[in-house]
Image (cartoon, helix red, strand yellow):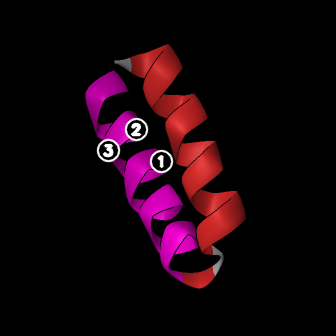
Amino acid sequence: AKQNNLDAIHDTVHEMCKDEARHGCAFKGLLDRYFN
């Protein structure tokens, strides 16, 4: 369940990255730092 939740978060952030590259990708980098 935890891994599926993280995948959902990752997909959401990926969509953010498409729409708002600067903010979305910065946030993705922050998530990657904590989760990976």
Task: Work out which residue is located at the far front of the displayed protein and give it.
Answer: 22
The C terminus is located in which quarter?
A: top left
Whether residue 4 appears in magenta in the rendering, the answer is yes
State the image quarter where residue 2 is shown. Answer: top left
Do the CB atoms of the residues marked 1 and 2 lie less than 8 Å apart?
Answer: yes
Q: Which mark is residue 20?
A: none
Whether residue 34 appears in magenta in the rendering, the answer is no
Label 3: which residue? 7
**Residue drawn at (51%, 57%), measured in percent from left and top?**
13
Do the CB atoms of the residues marked 2 and 3 lie less than 8 Å apart?
Answer: yes
Label 2: which residue? 5
Asked whether residue 19 is in view, the answer is yes
The residue type indicated by label 2 comes to Asn
Instruction: Classify 3 as above or below 16.
Output: above
* Span shown in magenta: 1-18
Q: Position of residue 12 (x, y in %)?
A: 49, 62
Gap between marks 1 and 2 measured at Cα? 6 Å
**Residue drawn at (52%, 68%), measured in percent from left and top?**
17
Label 1: which residue? 9
12 to the left or right of 23: left
